[in-house]
Image (cartoon, rainbow, N blue to C red):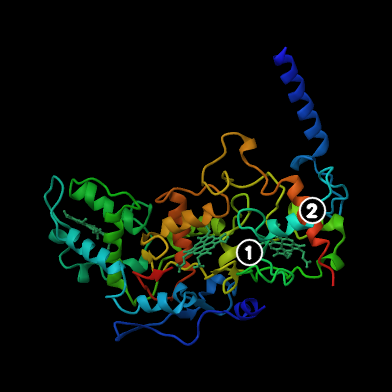
Amino acid sequence: MQRIFLLTFVVAGIGAAAMAEIAPDQVLWAEDGSIQESLTDTPGNPDEGEVIMATNALGNCVACHAVEAMPDVPFQGNIAPQLDGVADRWTEAELRGIVVDAKRIFPESFMPGMYKVGPFIRPGVAYTAKPPEMPEDIKPILSAQQVEDVVAYLMTLSE
Amino acid sequence: FAFIASSASAEPVKDDQLIVNGEEEIATEAPAPPHLDGAVGDTIYSGWLFRDTETRAMQKDDFDNPMFLFVDAGIEAWNTREGTAEKSCADCHNEIEDSMKGLRAELPKVTPEGELWSLENYVNDCRTNRMGAEPWGWNSQEMKNMTAAIGVQSRGMPVAVEIDGDAAPFWEKGKDMYYTRYGQLEMSCANCHEDNFGNYIRSDHLSQGQINGFPLYRLKDQGAVSTHQRFVGCVRDTRGVPFEAGSQEFRELELYVASRGLGLLVETPAVRH
């Protein structure tokens, strides 16, 4: 009895996840490198997005970008444009496209694709220097929900 | 934002000079070699110019430079008989100051057999084929001791690797690698060390990634770091799978990166943080 119950639960779980989230290789790109549709069913949380952008092990956007709206974050990089006012320059769909894979809008960009799993040249599993045993070992840098959180935060950066 | 404002202008330092032991002045910039075609502007800079005051100071005095412990160990090994031939390096090469002077500046180079060899290859060739001793690991402490001891004999001499003739095909491959975007972050050496030297990635002040000071002491690792070890670290940081230290690929890359420093003076053994 218990076994049947468990099985049903797991299947329902998979169904829900598949509905709620668009996988990196299923993203619907517009010609211009923007993504209209949210990657998840849950609206992005800008507070989470701010943390993700400032955290080394997550988005680490401040490694390259300065954001004056985050005065407490030390050692912001100066490689990429300052992000204040970015919501006036781009639509939400464009910002989603830039975060998922900036090379669609800026072809030679230095900015890594945050929701991209390939193709790459000699990809390793995170910073281990080890090749993946299976293609699934290459995980996107941010999850679908984290991308939505970051986009929600970027949308607050208008001047 | 004060930090950003000051870092934006944080080019290589302009108001310091590398004078070693109070007597030997080592120029830390040079006109960019013609093959770079202006890619980094007119001037190439030593990585020394991108480090903080304390780190720069350590390289100015051999007593403060932790690498000299390893140089001393290398000289001791130079004079030590080993292997089935019971010979030391000194038995064949005599004084390291004379026989090894200038060599570091010309490596890697193509052997008469047409292979591209780094200093480590030459050392292990003598150990295995002339001394009957075990080869040292590329990144072993013994190897770094010896390459530091040999390298310092060229300190102050201009980098002078050959890039034409037999070397050209290797150099071309190294150049391709330099511009290849490795790993999940899809970044090439050029993205960081050509397009962005002088800029900050978080708290890292990017240099031109020159190798004229290797092997060098890295304060963060509290130890000596070989050229290929640094390459491994930089490719790993792209979320990539590096080539092996000592591999054909990294010797080709070493030749190409060395050639981006043609005209800079050998600083072996340098200090970095």
Q: Which residue is mark 1?
A: A63
Q: Residue at x 50, y 85 (%)?
A: B14
Select label 2 or label 1 by which is in front: 2
Q: Position of residue A135 (x, y in %)?
A: 63, 36
Query: Looking at the picture, does residue B255 appear above or below residue B51?
Result: above
As helix, strand or loop, the secondary structure at mark 1 comes to helix
In the displayed structure, does residue A59 sit left or right of residue B130?
Answer: right
Q: Residue A89, how many percent across, how many down? A: 85, 67
Q: Quadrant of the N terminus of chain A?
A: top right
The residue pinned by badge 2 equals A45
Which is nearer the eye, B97 or A13? A13
Q: Quadrant of residue B154?
A: bottom left
**Label 2 Cα crowd, 10 Å radius (few <14 / some 14-19 / many 20+):** some
Mark 1 belongs to which subunit? A
Which residue corresponds to the image point at 38% horizontal and 59% vertical from the top-left?
B226
Residue A109 - label: none
Vertical arrangement, residue B35 with respect to residue A30, above or below: below
Q: Residues within 10 Å of mark 1 (few under 14, many from 20)?
A: many
